[in-house]
Amino acid sequence: MDMQLDESTVLITGASGGIGRALAEAFAAEGAQLILHAHTSSAALEDFVRTRPWAERAHIVRADVRDPDAVAQAFQSGAARFGRIDVAVANAGVWPPTSLPLDKLPVERIADTVGVNLLGAAWTARAWMAGLRTHGPRPDGRGASLLLIGSTAGRFGEAGHADYAMTKAGLHGLMRSLKNEVVHVDPYARVNTVEPGWTVTPMAAGSLATSGAIAGVTATMPLRQLARPEDIARACVVLASPAASRHVSGEVLTVAGGMEGRHLWSPQDVDEDAVRARLEQD
């Protein structure tokens, strides 16, 4: 199926991480031009892009997503290279690994998590909308698309990580507001959320390496496996596509193996070695 993303420009925040790199690969495979954002890992992102066959279609920008002016400048830099930005993926995020109850969480950690995960997504959306207002709708009727990367923690909560869970829950309100605002700028623009569950990324690797962690996680899923970054990226391509999802807006697509907020299996019944072996299969 032609996703109608060729010659579109896609901006991805947090493109240096596991899901970010998978997003870059997936959209590049559809023929899109890429604006790839990083902050502290911009050098690693540059090294990665340099090895890719689509490197000439990529433009790297550096910004702290907690700073709205820096985010706006990143969008302006991308627009100066490619013109209008059709798709934005607010993927940048942090998940502090130390588990602490809310009353023990340092105020600085809460403020930083909110600043990156929730306000960073809002500043990304704000800059994307400002660009649409400048450039106007595409003449071919391909509506623009904004994707917010949420988390199942925003639906079920996550004990010991209330700072993270509340930021991801906040994206639901942001999405449902923006879907009604953006059509006054581009009548076919859409805003959706992709909600991953546990995904094998560098950010989650330490927690998943703990003995019993995979069994505990997959015990809440009918599909006893973990997501790969590519699973999240493919879902984003579908929702961003004006061909596959032209009439889909304000929706949450959960990519979490059917996760529920309860155990479907006893953790003792989960074969962790089998789950790890599954990850190594193509």
Image: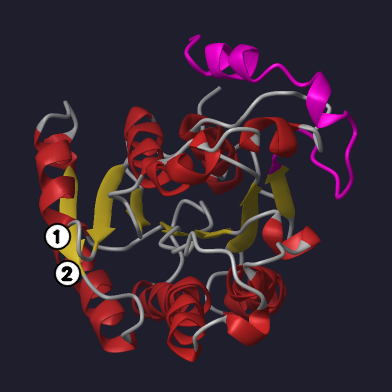
Residue at x 10% of width, y 41% of height: 47
Residue 204 coordinates in the image, percent (x, y): 48, 45
Looking at the image, can residue 269 be seen?
yes
- Left or right, 201 with reference to 40: right
Between 25 and 44, which is closer to the camera in this rendering? 44
Quadrant of image for the N terminus:
top right
Query: Separation of disc 1 and disc 2 at Cα?
Result: 7 Å
Residue 206 coordinates in the image, percent (x, y): 44, 43
Disc 2 marks a residue whose amino acid type is Ser
Residue at x 46% of width, y 66% of height: 137
Disc 1 marks a residue whose amino acid type is Arg
Residue at x 19% of width, y 32% of height: 54
Between 172 and 162, which is closer to the camera in this rendering? 162
Residue 269 found in image quarter: top right
Residue 201 found in image quarter: top left
The image's colouring method is secondary structure
Which structural element holds mark 2? helix
The residue carrying mark 1 is 81
Comparing marks 1 and 2, which lies closer to the viewer? Answer: 2
Q: Is residue 255 above or below residue 153?
A: above
Residues marked 1 and 2 touching at CB (< 8 Å): yes
| Residue 278 covered by magenta stretch | yes
Badge 1 density bin: few <14, some 14–19, many ≥20, Cα 10 Å: few
Looking at the image, can residue 249 be seen?
no
The residue carrying mark 2 is 77
Between 187 and 61, which is closer to the camera in this rendering? 61
What segment carries the magenta color? 255-282
